[in-house]
Amino acid sequence: MSRHFEWLQVLNQCKREVEDQIRPLLASARKPQPNLGIGAGGDPMKQIDLAAEEAIVNTLRKQEISFTLISEESGFKEYGKKSDQCYVTADPIDGTTNLTRGIPFYATSIAISEKPTLNTVHAALVADLFHDVTYTAQKGKGAYRNDMRISPSEGSSLEEAVIGIDLNSYKVQKIASQLTGLIQKTKHIRHFGANALELCYVADGTTEGFIDIRGKLRPTDMAAAWLIINEAGAKITSINMDPLDVTLSPKQKVEFVASANPRIHKIIIDLLKKKKEKE
Ligand code: IPD
Ligand code: CA
């Protein structure tokens, strides 16, 4: 059994534990929550986020894995004697607002890497906790939706494409003009509210693109989906088409354009850049 295959087993175990731990909290998630302070990523922490993080940590500890956790909630935390042996980058619950409102679109996201850098992520899981759909990937071994290998859409017509854009920012004015051309040419624009899962939708051909150029997203939210996108054969780059060179830290910010295939990637990027160059 390869090391990578073992990692997928561990990640699936983490997911099951997250499900078990958050289940009793779901009914009261919309009620006023105790003040648990601000998480490492800068957002107020909720009981359900912490329960999900604890589930991940406990699962890894039970398997006697030494690791450094990089989490949106607790930030950097070392576990075990050789905590630099691997890095576990987690967004225990991506889409907490959806979850607390009863909107059925939220996920747990866990990435395993050799170093605290995005380009060393080698195993990943993003699990849609409402629909029981799990995306996984291992470096060099493809990406899967449950047991089915996935590949992205071949479509390149913006007329027919479904493109996700995260406009969730107080500073939306700063990026609005850059996005206008793309929005005008795309018939179906979406944002569902859990970016890890929305990236997986690009990976499995559900949508043709997902763009987040707010300068607000933490790599903890997209590290796992980054590998799933790449292993599925879709594209994810900076707006300048460069590979994403990101340090894994809840304090870091990342911007990206993810698209199903090189043709639509270029079309989207050309539209985003056109406006920027004119300014
Ligand atoms: C949030 C979601 C949302 C995005 C926010 C993220 P969280 O993640 O991914 O779609 O617009 O910027 O913070 O806070 O629920 O883990
Ligand atoms: Ca979160």
Image (cartoon, helix red, strand yellow):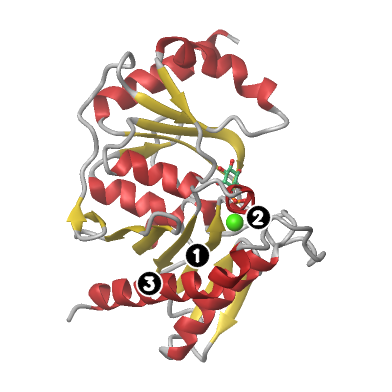
- Say what amino acid the circle numbered 2 marks: Lys
Q: Nearer the viewer, residue 244 or 64?
A: 64
Mark seen at residue 251: 2
- Compared across the picture, whether 129 is left or right of 219 comes to left
> What residue appears at the point 62 percent right and 58 percent down from the top-left corner?
250
Q: Are marks 3 and 1 in contact (CB under 8 Å)?
A: no
**The residue tagged with tag 1: helix, strand or loop?**
strand
- Say what amino acid the circle numbered 3 marks: Leu
- Compared across the picture, whether 273 is left or right of 147 comes to right
> In the image, which is nearer the foreground, mark 1 or mark 2?
1
Q: Nearer the viewer, residue 227 or 244?
A: 227
Write down the residue under mark 1: 89
Write down the residue under mark 3: 11
x and y percentages locating residue 117 in the rendered image: 47, 59
In three-dimensional space, the C-alpha distance between marks 1 and 2, rounded to whole angstroms, equals: 13 Å
Mark nearer the N terminus (1 vs 2): 1
- Say what amino acid the circle numbered 1 marks: Thr
Q: Nearer the viewer, residue 159 or 6?
A: 159
> What residue appears at the point 56 percent right and 50 percent down from the top-left corner?
95
**The residue tagged with tag 2: helix, strand or loop?**
loop
Q: Are marks 3 and 2 in contact (CB under 8 Å)?
A: no
> What residue appears at the point 17 percent right and 81 percent down from the top-left corner?
1
In three-dimensional space, the C-alpha distance between marks 3 and 1, rounded to whole angstroms, equals: 12 Å
> In the image, which is nearer the foreground, mark 3 or mark 1?
3
**The residue tagged with tag 3: helix, strand or loop?**
helix
Q: State whether residue 216 is above or below residue 27.
A: above
